[in-house]
Image (cartoon, grey):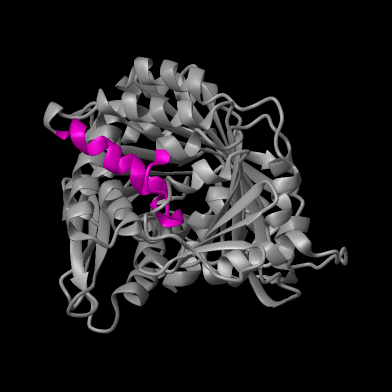
Amino acid sequence: MRSASKSLLSFAALAAFLFVSCGTEPTGLRSLAPVDAAVYLETPDLGALLGKLAGSPAIGQGERKFDPSRLDGMEAAVAVTGFEASESAVTESEAVLNFQPQFTLIAETHAWSWQMEPLVTGTLGEFVNANYGAGTKFEKSEREGEQWYIWTAPDGRKAFAAVSGSQVFFGNNEAGVESCLAVKKGEQKSLLDSDRLSRQYEAAKGKLAFGYVSEEGVAALSEFAGISMAIERSEQAGERSVISSVFPQLIRNAVKEIVWTAREEGEGIEDVVDIKLDDNVAEAFEASMRPSATADREMLKFVPPDAFSATRYNLRNPRVAFRSLLLASATKVDPSATRFVPLLGASLLQPYGVADPEAFLSFIGSSIVTVLFDEANSQSAAIVRTDDFEELRKHLLQGFAKAEGADPETWSEAESGLRAVRTGSYVVIGDEVSVAKCLRAAGSQNDAAKESDLTRSAYFGLAVRPEHSSVTVSRDLSSASELAEVFITGRTAVKIETYEVTMTDFERFGIKRTYRSAFGFPGLIVSQFADAR
């Protein structure tokens, strides 16, 4: 989702460079956002949020480009009122999906009226021109006492800004800006009238940032999620069509709302995403997805130091968990689509050569480890433990055959290029290169610490602990350098990469995903400003 959020969230970072807070009391920007906003993001104190990012030891030392404390007390929010999806061709056979949110950034500047014109036409105009390129046209007008500014790129893209008092409304959709102004005038209802959001908002007070996706927003995002999953999980046109049509139905009918909060956690940030599910689905998942009381520590020895990410699943009964997933999913799609749900489930284990997931999972232990070696997921492996390898092997793709003279025991599948290797009670399955790396890691006696060793990162220890249904530890290869570009001049000692961890739990309301990292989701948002400059 990083590229999908870029066009929306890069502008949220812009607020940090536009306005100077006078330290007045917060006004509550929900009162300026339309009640039908699909997504709403807010920080009650932009200075505190940016100060946390700018002060991170991960981005090194150097002369700061600006002092975030000048923005202490400033409020900023983003309201998304719609989405547009389009495809752009890369080659004759490949296309890239573009997902464009229609958003309005709302900023309470607490600035005087005479300060607003240079802020908008100066800093904001320079930012838009840098994004839209040479030949961008600019117009200024007055509508009902409000100053309007419109930028038009040579390719037809437009950006709109309206100034009303000390508030700026800026977006890529004129109707969205007009809607916020109508809310301010009392002509439309605001998000203050959303009881569900208000309850979540009150509970999140004191956090660095807050985000909310309504049921309508979930439905809109599900279409993009379905297409993305189809592209990621299959290369077959028929399978992609099924996944892209069934998966959005599941999301729309099972997910009721999403709430995000960010808070300080040590030197980094902790993001918590609560995904509220349909009551029946949440109850089924809470019962079937519970973690086992113990986790297989030995399995983590197969994770190589140079892995990009590693995920440890720990379920009391993987087969029951998988079956619960299918049964719950079948109740949330159209009757005509229920026959495709098993195909959707099978796609989850297809990259590891599993032909019959439910049968396969019935012959393994409670833990599963998956390893990725790059962000594109082009190289990966899975590690499982089994007491009955012969039965387990029957549920791999039929093309798997014994490789003669292999030591340890090796099976390969010619068409997919996948390999399955048995070593003791463990089986490693994946592409040939990834499997070899995992086997070398398990047999290595080298205990020398290396800074780039994923398994020696501070978060990797959480994968050993059994209390979460899944834990993913991964690298962040770009945020530190991008944020250094945003905040620091003449910086030194910038870390090439940092690490992050994601923990997933199934609770009574649904799914709780906890992320800990150096910069969190706020860092992802602000780092887009470096990309856009």
Residue 182 placement, left or right of 390: left
Can see residue 72? no
In this picture, is 343 found above or below 286?
below
Q: Nearer the viewer, residue 502 or 176?
A: 502
Above or below, 428 relative to 175: below
Of the pair 28 and 206, the residue shown nearer to us? 206
Place of residue 196 in the rendered image (x, y in percent of width and height, measured from the top left)? 37, 20
Regarding residue 422, the answer to whether it shows in the image is yes
Q: Is residue 238 magenta?
A: no
**Residue drawn at the location 67% of the way across and 41% of the way down:** 264
- Count of all numbered marks drawn on residues in the image: 0
Q: Looking at the image, which residue sits at the far bottom?
A: 134
Q: Main secondary structure of the magenta part?
A: helix
Q: Quadrant of the N terminus?
A: bottom left
Q: Quadrant of residue 120?
A: bottom left
Q: Residue at x 48, y 65 (%)?
A: 412
Q: Is residue 340 within the magenta segment?
A: yes
Q: Whole-percent x and y of residue 402?
A: 51, 63
Q: Which residue is rendered at x = 30% and y = 57% of the image?
A: 234
418 w.r.t. 91: above or below: above
| Picture coordinates of residue 84, whole percent (x, y) | 19, 53
**Apparent side of residue 36 relative to residue 213 in the rendered image (left or right):** left
The quadrant of the picture occupied by the C terminus is: bottom left
Q: Residue 334: image x %, image y %?
A: 15, 29
Q: Which stretch did the figure color magenta?
A: 337-357
